[in-house]
Amino acid sequence: MSNNLGRLFQKKSIANIQKEAAKSPLKRTLGPINLMSLGVGAIIGAGIFVLTGQVASANAGPAIMLSFVVAGIACALAGLCYAELASTMPVSGSAYTYAYGTLGEVFAWIMGWLLVLEYGIAASTVAVGWSGYVVSLLGDFGVHFPAIGTGTDHPATMWATPLVRAVTDDGGHTTMMLSGTFNLIAAIGIAAVTCLLVLGVSESANVNNFIVVLKIIVLLTFIAVGITYINPDNWHPFIPPATGNPGEFGVGGIFRGAAIIFFAYVGFEAVSTAAAEAKNPSRDVPVGILGALIICTIIYMAVAAVMTGVVPYLELASPAPIAVAIDRMALTWANFPWPFVEGGQMNAISLLIKVGAVAGLSSVMLVLCFGQTRIFYTMSRDGLLPAVFSKIHDKFRTPWLGTILLGIMVAVAASFLPISLLGDLVSLGTAVAFSIVCLSVIYLRITHPEMERPFKVPGGIFTAVLGILACLFLATQNFAPMVDHAMKGNTLPLTILVCYAIVGALIYAAYGFWHSKLSKGIDITEDADLSSPADAFRGNIDDKK
């Protein structure tokens, strides 16, 4: 019994982790610009096209700009820790592998299961939002989806609504109901992303780079045009007075808003999952992580400032708040004849925003699905998941079978489940995962002070401690509403959290515990002669000569 318990806390040696990085069969094609673009591609998406308006109208008001600052600071602290670990252990498993080498196998499994929330469930959430913008854009081209009755005041759009819907009444009680349709559009989007990821990471990165440029142009256009339409009166009061309900305006609303939009910053973590496919991860991964964080925080704040300056914050409760702001500007000079819409005219800026939203959310789905496949690839190589997730395609050099299986699971979730209820859960899992990464830095600084660190966290352990405190604080801002809702009779969010934890524990107990290669003494690295990632990099260069 004691031996079994001891197995739970077995750690991978840092030397073996570095050998894994050196001998990775994944194709090294990503440079610092690709990695930064990968992060920006995931960060600038649902957070700016969907969540910004909802947080402003329900939690923070114009002070949503401060919410972005709070969330950005917490992510920056965690990002610095990620950068140090990624420069030392450039492996595809990212935070999962960091936990395995510092805290032990059971913590690695917990981290991996949290990352399923961070990537898989988040990708499903984004796919649902993507489908809404696609339906709106197709409507502009004369392709309309019928609305179907559901017996309530909440109509559903055929082929763009999950089968199971969560409907909240005026008293805050949530009930489950069948919509009579399913979200085929979201499933198609995930299928397209899955096919792209099977073909290869360099091809996926090239598509992502194009999309990132497109949506940055769209957002900069929105900022440039919107500045001249800002009414400063809409920024008063900058911090709306608290209503008395937890997280509704006041200072509490700023923190609650930061906790919600924390989900939008998941993308920078995806950069570290690509470390095994970076040309020079010790240099490029830190640049990619920190560069993506800085760029996205500045853009987020600028867009939020324009949005709340143009439209009173209470009127931004829309799944497409940027479109609301564009409509409020009444840019008649940008109208042009368009026979497919009512009135026979279309606004060029509005059309550009919708195209940018569809493209932006597409790149988010791409990066989130990419990150999820690489986490499962590494867990499978360790024996904690079935071998199918680490099967590499002979031609494309990608974990193709695992990518397809994960794509199917994400598509099914987006098609059938009420993903909107899982927003807090995604942010909660992300915050806890980030705090474990910060803890890993502290552990390695104490136990392996001699380790070579191409990138070092400024401030060392003190900065890592601040990262833990900041991330756990935001996690409580997501967990507390679940408990509050449960006490008021709405137990669904908390029930989902508990069931998710139980399922994870059962999978580890039934499979991972018995198939762990570490516990069997199996070294998954195939060449013991390679002592560091640098050896592999030199080998890659030699191969190209």
Image (cartoon, grey):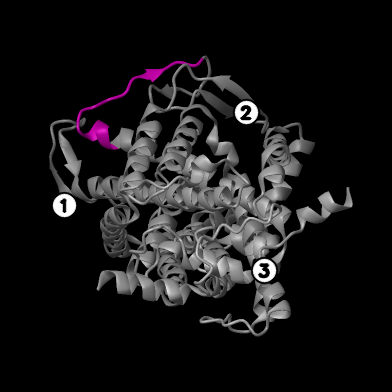
In this orientation, does residue 213 appear? yes
Q: Position of residue 387 (x, y in %)?
A: 53, 42
Residue 440 is marked as 3
Disc 3 marks a residue whose amino acid type is Ser
Q: CA separation, marks 1 and 2?
A: 41 Å
Residue 303 vertical position relative to residue 318 in the rendered view, above or below: below
Disc 2 marks a residue whose amino acid type is Asp
Q: How many residues crowd around disc 2 within 10 Å: few (fewer than 14), some, or many (20 or more)?
A: few
Nearest to N terminus: mark 3 or mark 1: 1
In contact (CB < 8 Å): disc 2 and disc 3? no
State the residue at coordinates (70%, 61%).
472
Q: Is residue 138 magenta?
A: yes
In the depicted view, which residue is nearer to us: 283 or 261? 283
- On the picture, is 535 further left or further right than 80? left
Label 1, secondary structure: give it. Answer: helix
- On the picture, is 125 further left or further right than 103? left
Residue 169 is marked as 2
Q: Which residue is identified by label 1?
A: 333
In this orientation, does residue 245 appear? no
Nearest to N terminus: mark 1 or mark 2: 2
Q: Position of residue 195 (x, y in %)?
A: 33, 40
Residues shaded magenta: 137-150
